[in-house]
Image (cartoon, rainbow, N blue to C red):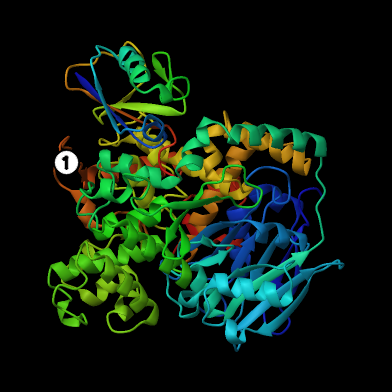
């Protein structure tokens, strides 16, 4: 089980700040997220990737983009706007 | 001349000083407009060793070639002077119709020097004349009003064709972090409102009918349409849908949300404060500056009125003071707007006093020593804001800002005062964002997130945000240069995500508006020139290497720790050294004469340079 924490517009569109699901890599996590939160599909999530206007941090340590990125049980993905700050 | 009038207007009540001053084509091309052109005018108009609140200080309102064009977000002006908080060069941006009307007076900038004998309103009228007429009137009953009230009264009495930039009571009372504002938007940082107040100028009203031609009107319109279309895309969605307040929860998650005077980067009340779009306070409107397609301003209900809320105000008056009740934070932000106070410096100074109070360092000086002015006390924040503008009791110390107040308080409080060069830190905890830590330390304006966007590097994934190094320094330089260009054009930084190549596209915009045959490389040099010009002026006014640092609170001797973000002194020093080297400066942070010459900054107005230092 992994967790996806949503911030800003993704949270607004999804109507929740947290989604938990089973996933072995980033691509499957995002596909699962799009299924769980249809409001994100096609705008924030494009297939197995995040839209370029958004980014993902793995456990707050590093930013990840490639669908093949391996996820481990207990990992937390943070989904936020690419334009952080302001 | 396309895009420019080729002159600035000098306003000065002293004999023989006022009038229009020509600006040659080379200078305009070298500095473009906004903070670049404004810095050049301040350099010329301000004598060395100036008191920022003295009559010799010059306050510049600088426009740009893009003002008045159809390009989205181009209705902006820069306000530039030496700042009373820092004694260093300060520039702040503001937006909307004032910029357009000021340019229609027939000048590219207005430079205000001297001081009037009584509170005054200045009218600059460029209607039907070649050179604008300048008239003054006593401010009378306008003195004491908020900037918004003064602006409304002037337009009511003299006509809606006037656009007005004004100060509030904080500027009149020379609070060193007073703002100057127009249409509810503030040139917020560094106390430029106090500079205007020191000249006893309540407001400047402008109108005119002089337009500058576009070199290639059809190409300009084509580029404007493209930029507007992209400005409505996903890159700016955050600003449209939520505004910058959306940063708060994300920063909290990255331990980068300054809390209780930077004692922590994590606030346990963040969800209550901003979890549901500012909790119980309903959003009542969304607004845009003139000529803007983004519309980032989100207005919330506060009692019977509306209040703007931005991330910086939210963090400074909320988590930084330990306050998690959105009602009090909105009221505090609204009060700052009415009084004309920079919310970052206000919150930073109050939070610093809260920590001093909790340590028992100032209780004897508080009006109610029994648990007043403690973290989390929303009503105390409101009282403190009013007290500092009235300069009553502890308010006299609050009105100094955190650096000077620490000198009064003593007891080692200077280690906790949250400032760089006297300017309070914005809402980015430097221990969790090392590139930003460097940007804050070396910023010419002081601790600043608008002139250094180094946090972009920290969140880019290209540098390790908790183990900063040479790559962080190079990234910080790049973000500073980009900001210098954007602030000289002037365009809104919220557009930054829509440019595939900022320099290439900016060159295209300037070619269409001015007719200059310039390219991206020239604009890269221009950006470096603007950054170096500001640094040269700081050197001229006595800057030393010791100023480029962070308060001791942020610096530890411990190695990096994944559990609790830290920043070691050695790491910061390594980044500063790499930054100086990347800028072509010597190890003391001074630009060599050769660099000044290369950037055309070798004139006497920019000071003697490294070889001429005493």
Above or below B474: residue B129? below
Residue sitting nearer the eye, B461 or B44? B461
Residue B447 can be seen, yes or no: no
On the image, the x and y values in percent for residue B512 come to 76, 38
**Numbered-mark total:** 1
Give neighbour class at mark 1: few <14, some 14-19, many 20+ (Cα, 10 Å): few
Q: Secondary structure at mark 1?
A: loop
Residue at the spot of label 1? B564
Above or below A28: residue B200? below
Above or below B589: residue A83? above
Residue B48 can be seen, yes or no: yes
Quick check: B348 left or right of B142? Answer: left
Residue sitting nearer the eye, B161 or B473? B161
Location of residue B605 by image quarter: bottom right
Quadrant in which the C terminus of chain B appears: bottom left
Q: Residue at x 16, y 41 (%)?
A: B564
Q: Chain of mark 1?
A: B
Location of residue B402 by image quarter: bottom left
């Amino acid at each position: 089980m992994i967790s996806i924490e949503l911030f800003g517009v993704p949270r607004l569109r999804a109507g929740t700040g947290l989604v938990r699901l089973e996933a072995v890599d980033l691509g499957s996590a995002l596909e699962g997220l799009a299924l769980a939160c249809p409001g994100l599909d096609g705008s924030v999530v494009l297939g197995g990737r995040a839209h370029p206007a958004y980014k993902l941090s793995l456990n707050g340590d590093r930013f990840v983009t490639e669908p093949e990125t391996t996820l481990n049980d207990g990992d937390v993905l943070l989904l936020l706007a690419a334009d952080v700050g302001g | 001349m396309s895009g420019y009038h080729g002159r600035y207007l000098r306003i000065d009540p002293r004999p023989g000083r006022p009038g229009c001053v020509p600006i040659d084509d080379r200078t305009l091309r070298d500095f473009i407009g906004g903070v670049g052109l404004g810095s050049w005018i301040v350099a010329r108009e301000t004598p060395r060793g100036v008191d920022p609140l003295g009559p010799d200080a010059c306050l510049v309102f600088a426009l740009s070639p893009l003002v008045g064009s159809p390009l989205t977000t181009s209705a902006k002006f820069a306000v530039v002077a030496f700042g009373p908080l820092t004694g260093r060069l300060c520039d702040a941006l503001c937006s909307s119709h004032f910029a357009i009307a000021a340019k229609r007076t027939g000048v590219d900038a207005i430079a205000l020097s001297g001081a009037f004998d009584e509170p005054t309103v200045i009218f600059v009228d460029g209607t039907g004349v070649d050179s604008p007429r300048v008239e003054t009137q006593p401010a009378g009953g306008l003195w004491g009003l908020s900037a918004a009230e003064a602006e409304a009264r002037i337009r009511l009495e003299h006509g809606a064709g006037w656009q007005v930039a004004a100060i509030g009571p904080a500027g009149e009372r020379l609070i060193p972090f007073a703002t100057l504002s127009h249409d509810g938007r503030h040139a917020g940082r560094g106390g430029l409102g106090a500079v205007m107040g020191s000249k006893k100028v309540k407001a400047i009203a402008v109108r005119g009918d002089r337009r500058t031609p576009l070199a290639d009107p059809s190409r300009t319109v084509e580029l404007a349409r493209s930029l507007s279309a992209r400005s409505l895309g996903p890159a700016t969605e955050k600003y449209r849908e939520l505004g910058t307040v959306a940063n708060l929860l994300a920063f909290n998650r990255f331990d980068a949300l300054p809390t209780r005077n930077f004692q922590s980067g994590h606030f346990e009340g963040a969800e209550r404060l901003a979890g549901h779009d500012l909790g119980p306070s309903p959003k009542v409107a969304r607004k845009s500056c003139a000529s803007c397609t983004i519309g980032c301003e989100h207005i919330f209900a506060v009692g019977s009125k509306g209040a703007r809320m931005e991330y910086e105000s939210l963090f400074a008056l909320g988590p930084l003071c330990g306050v998690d009740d959105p009602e009090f934070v909105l009221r505090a932000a609204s009060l700052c707007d009415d009084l004309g106070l920079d919310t970052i410096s206000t919150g930073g100074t109050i939070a610093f006093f809260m920590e001093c109070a909790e340590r028992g360092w100032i209780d004897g000086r508080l009006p109610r020593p029994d648990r007043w002015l403690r973290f989390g006390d929303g009503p105390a924040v409101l009282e403190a804001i009013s007290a500092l503008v009235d300069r009553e009791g502890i308010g006299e110390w609050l009105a100094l800002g955190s650096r000077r107040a620490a000198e009064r308080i003593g007891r080692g409080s200077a280690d906790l005062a949250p400032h760089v060069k006297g300017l309070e830190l914005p809402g980015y905890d430097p221990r969790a964002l090392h590139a930003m830590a460097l940007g804050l330390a070396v910023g010419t304006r002081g601790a600043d997130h608008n002139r250094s966007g180094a946090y972009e590097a920290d969140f880019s994934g290209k540098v390790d945000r908790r183990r900063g190094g040479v790559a962080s320094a190079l990234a910080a330089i790049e973000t500073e240069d980009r900001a210098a260009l954007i602030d000289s054009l002037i365009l809104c930084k919220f557009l930054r995500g829509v440019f595939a190549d900022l320099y290439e596209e900016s060159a295209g915009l300037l070619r269409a508006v001015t007719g200059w045959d310039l390219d991206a490389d020239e604009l890269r040099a221009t950006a470096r020139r603007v950054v170096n010009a500001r640094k040269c002026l700081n050197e001229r006014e006595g800057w030393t290497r010791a100023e480029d640092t962070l308060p001791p609170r942020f610096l530890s001797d411990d190695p990096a720790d994944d559990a609790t973000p830290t920043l070691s002194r050695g790491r910061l020093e390594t980044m500063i050294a790499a930054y100086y080297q990347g800028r072509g400066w010597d190890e003391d942070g001074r630009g060599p004469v050769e660099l000044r010459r290369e950037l055309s900054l070798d004139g006497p107005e920019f000071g003697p340079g490294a070889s001429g230092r005493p």
